[in-house]
Amino acid sequence: MKRAGPDPADRIDYPASTAFFAIHLACFAALFTGVPLGAAVLAIALYFLRIFAIGAGYHRYFAHRAFRTSRAFQFILGFLAQTSAQRGVLWWAAHHRRHHKHSDTDLDVHSPILRSVFYAHVGWILVPRNEATDLEIVRDLARYKELRWLDRHAYLPAATLAFATWLIAGLPGLAVGFCWSTVAVWHATFSINSLGHLLGRRRYVTGDHSRNNWLLALITMGEGWHNNHHAYQASVRQGFRWWEYDFTFYLLRLLSCLGLVWDLHAPPKAVVNREQRLGRTVIDRAARQLALSFPINAIAGQALDALSRAPGWAEMKSRALSARLQAEAFWSEFDLPQIPSLEEMRAYARARLAQTPSLDEIAVRARERLLELVYSRLVEAAWREGHT
């Protein structure tokens, strides 16, 4: 898949991002304050507390509603998640829902496939056009006035926590306990957006590049089973197999025993076992990925060379250029050896995609998409040929 070219609207506003970079620089204050044991323990504790709050709160509850809880505990989850300084709860949920709706397409806010890894990792957060919150996509959350208040005061929980670390352990508590853990939390969670679509295995066909990565799952308490998550977003458990550790899920199970959360959604067995047929959107996206993995320009060049010697090509070219001939009609008259047959496309799909009952549908759609793409390249080449 081609990366999108640079978009002026994607430029980072460095002056407005001063606080973000300042917290990174503040980590070096530990060179002067030292790293006492108490501050180090505080940093570790705050790292895991906030990683849990992001995974259980921002992600599994607010973005995906994978379990239910009381209004009071909902606020606590939102407050704890916002101590990570990753903006407001409504902002986070809205952008994440948009990511899933358009994953690894032009409308995805942080795809490392279409943009740079840096942009997908952190750049998108620092771009002014991504600051707004689409309340329409989070209407179920925006009806709570306390969540709207939290969202308006996005950094108040983080500032409160920073002040508390200073009270508890002085400047080392602030530099190490707060700043070190905050930066670590940022880059651990940001890595799911970037590395989680580049490194690892794809057990399920999801129509995007999401992957399972055991190391990311370890440092994010279960969020690294990203391909699992994209296969069934409503699951409270992201480690589908018994050996896929998911500490966020384990803690949520404990909270359910205490009556603080309930209705923990589990993935259906048909999904886990790759027996459920895929939806039309996923099939279309998977087919597009498959079609784009072919050397389309090279195929079109070879096809054009073969067609230029075929009888009737001049008339067909004239009809194509006048828009009186669509791809389907064109391929009904020409059968080129450069274009894979449906059976060849099925074999190609089997070799590159995970097991799914929808494999044949993906192969059929992928061949249709490939024919459309090659035809468009042929028309472009024919037009250039006629204007040179």
Image (spheres, helix red, strand yellow):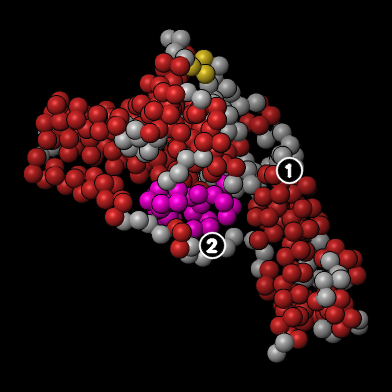
The kind of residue tagged 2 is Ala
Q: Which residue is rendered at x = 76% and y = 75% of the image?
A: 379
Is 27 on the left-hand or right-hand side of 187?
A: left
Residue hosting label 1 = 280
| Farthest residue, direction top | 258
**The disc label shown at residue 258, or none:** none
Residue 71 placement (x, y as % from top left): 45, 16
Q: Residues within 10 Å of mark 2 (few under 14, many from 20)?
A: few
Q: Is residue 352 visible?
A: yes
Q: Which residue is rendered at x = 74% and y = 69% of the image?
A: 376
What segment carries the magenta color? 103-130
CA gap between label 2 and label 1 equals 25 Å
Pick the front one: 49 or 41: 49
Residue 85 placement (x, y as % from top left): 33, 37
161 is higher (above) or lower (below) than 24: above
Q: Is residue 23 magenta?
A: no
The kind of residue tagged 1 is Arg
Residue 359 placement (x, y as % from top left): 74, 46
Q: Which residue is rendered at x = 43% and y = 9% of the image?
A: 258
| Farthest residue, direction bottom | 388
Pick the front one: 350 or 269: 269
Q: Quadrant of residue 215?
A: top left
**The disc label shown at residue 4, or none:** 2
142 is higher (above) or lower (below) than 131: above
Q: Quadrant of residue 233?
A: top right
Pick the front one: 316 or 302: 316
Q: Residues within 10 Å of mark 1 (few under 14, many from 20)?
A: few
Is 147 on the left-hand or right-hand side of 262?
A: left
Q: Quadrant of the C terminus?
A: bottom right
Is 183 on the left-hand or right-hand side of 30?
A: right
Could you tell me which secondary element the residue under label 2 belongs to?
loop
